[in-house]
Amino acid sequence: MTDVLRIRDLNKSFGGIVVADDINLDLRAGRVLGLIGPNGAGKTSLFNLVTGVVKPDTGSITLDGQSIDALPIYQRARRGLARTWQNLRLFPSLSVLDNVMLGPRDYPGEKLTSLIFDARGVARRQAEERDRAHAILKRTGLAGVAQSRVQDIAYGQQKLVGVARALMNDARCLLLDEPMAGVEGQAYGAIQRVVRDIAESGVAVCVVEHNVAFVRDLCDEGVFMFAGKVLARGTVGELIADPRLTELYFGT
Amino acid sequence: MEYVVTIIILVGLFVILAASFDLIIGYCGLISIAHPIFYAIGAYTSAMLAKEAGFPVPLAMLMGAGAALVSSILVALPSLRVSGDYLLIASIGFQLGLIELAKHFHEIGGAGGLTNIPPFLIREVGREAYAVLVVVIAALTVWFVRWMATGPYGRMMSALRDDELAFSMLGRNAIWVKVSVFGIGSAIAGLAGGLYAHYFRFIEPDQFGLLASSAVLTMVVVGGMRTTWGPVVGAIVLQLLPQVITFFGLPPSVLGPLQGIMFTGLVLVFMFMRPQGLIAASDLWRGREGGARHD
Ligand SMILES: Nc1ncnc2c1ncn2[C@@H]1O[C@H](COP(=O)(O)OP(=O)(O)O)[C@@H](O)[C@H]1O
Ligand SMILES: [Mg+2]
């Protein structure tokens, strides 16, 4: 089993708040890792550190064996790192389809030279990406709302748009920040199925989630975070059964 | 007749300026009002190359656009790397600084302005031909901005305006998109500058200052940002309005400030009464491919 993402000795604090305290973590191809911990544990911050949104104080991260420490966000994404956001961050002035169409690692027409001197090539590649986007929308159960505005669809569907957008990356490593929060009904099953599929295709997946049943059913393994530290790693069942961790989780 | 031709040329030039400025401030959401300085750079570069170095005027105009492109990238790159908010400050500083500087360079005419700029087309073919040239370039500019805005770049600009961080996380290079759009818009302004210089044959630093900035901003806001025809309507309305005022025969000392007040007043009125401008943009981006595929 190969490590897609390697996090070594990662530290970060904001003033007095330590959000990452000597974190060492590996994400493996084809596996789903659950990231569990109470609010404020530093889960989202870990995603921000990995994706380059926040710069670490010390530590290093490699993606497929190559250091990504010096890379800006967009270049990390182009190496195959994709994520969703706890607070969605969709593009409200774009339709569902157009939100998703922005996701390819290599967006046709982003280079002005190709846009101007190879307009046909760009148009052809745009059409290909459009077909891929339609396929992903179908797979995530969003085919019926492809032309809708993102703010007009149900919250669960909006979460799925975030996932669909990330899937366009054809990522090596996918980070999902609370994909189930506020989601019920059809979208619930859809997200679970899609995440399972993605992992089976060889992607390293990490999910932050408070929904215990979801995490237990989906994740091959879990880590428990608290105050910026990784306290334990094991199956989700083991982590849930640990009274020390449940006490930290539910607070004092 | 000469008066009418001149008005058509002025309207055409302002259509070019407003449409290219709409690309920057409307479609891409880059906050800058220094558009006229790139107009000035195009005008001065083209005028000097034709007058002092004997360049053929069309080539000089293209060099003027190139100079505007390069200088706009030099202004935008460092400020956009820090944060979008610095662009406004950096570009205004650049605009006002360069205008002051130009006033002290006698080689380019100093504060008194640059005179005897070589004419183009006017003598050989006539003023009407020049008006046709300007109108054609204005139409091409409007078409080009629409082409950019409804294609792959338009989708990127909409997303970038909505959420730069989420945009970057998809692998899109936000700074590159912003600098490219700023550069392209400014280059078009530079071309307009060349077209101005070789028709009117006189340019002075002060005509490219904040009054010009407020005029172009007003055209875009009043006409309607992020629309194809908004900058056109804005340029026509705001170019004809001052012409109407000139009929009242007010002295120039009153006329200039009056126009400034009028532009500022119009922007304020529209901001409060009709922020979308005369022509309202759709709040949902639609690409030209349509993309309505039902299966
Ligand atoms: N940019 C920031 N500046 C200051 N404090 C921050 C910042 N981002 C996160 N924090 C703080 O770090 C802690 C961890 O936050 P977060 O990573 O969002 O936790 P979680 O996702 O586990 O709920 C919180 O106390 C939060 O307030
Ligand atoms: Mg969080």
Image: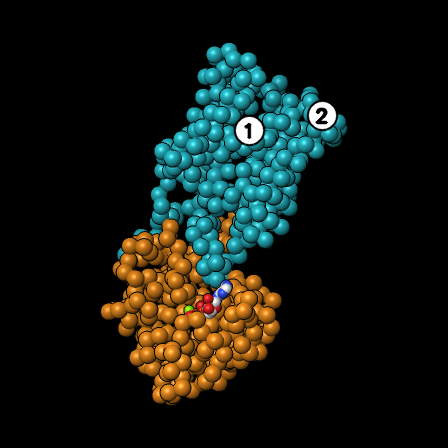
Chain colours: A orange, B cyan
Q: Who is closer to the viewer here, A53 or B4?
A: A53
Residue B225 at what x, y percent from top left? Answer: 42, 38
Q: Is residue B17 above or below residue A154?
A: above
* Left or right position of A101 against A186: right
**Residue at far top of view:** B249
Query: On what subunit does the disc labeled 1 rest?
Result: B
At label 1, counting other C-alpha atoms closer than 10 Å, the crowd grade (few under 14, some 14-19, many 20 or more) is some
Task: Identify the amino acid type marked 2.
Answer: Gly
Say which residue appears at 47% left-offset and 39% top-offset.
B22
Which residue is tagged 2? B109
Residue A65 horizontal/vertical position (percent): 57, 77
Q: What residue type is labelled 1?
A: Leu
Residue A5 against residue B84 in the figure, above or below? below
Q: Find disc 1 in the rendering and name its residue.
A: B211
Do we see residue A163 in this rendering? yes
Identity of the residue drawn at 49% across and 53% down: A109
Q: Which of B79 and A246 is in front in this view?
A: A246
Classify mark 1: helix, strand or loop. helix
Which quadrant holds residue B93?
top right
Q: Residue at x 60, y 30 (%)?
A: B208
Q: Is A220 left, or right, of B92 in this rendering?
A: left
Task: Tell me which image quadrant ligand 2 sits in.
Answer: bottom left
* Structural distance between the alpha carbons of marks 2 and 1: 21 Å
Q: Do labels 2 and 1 share a chain?
A: yes
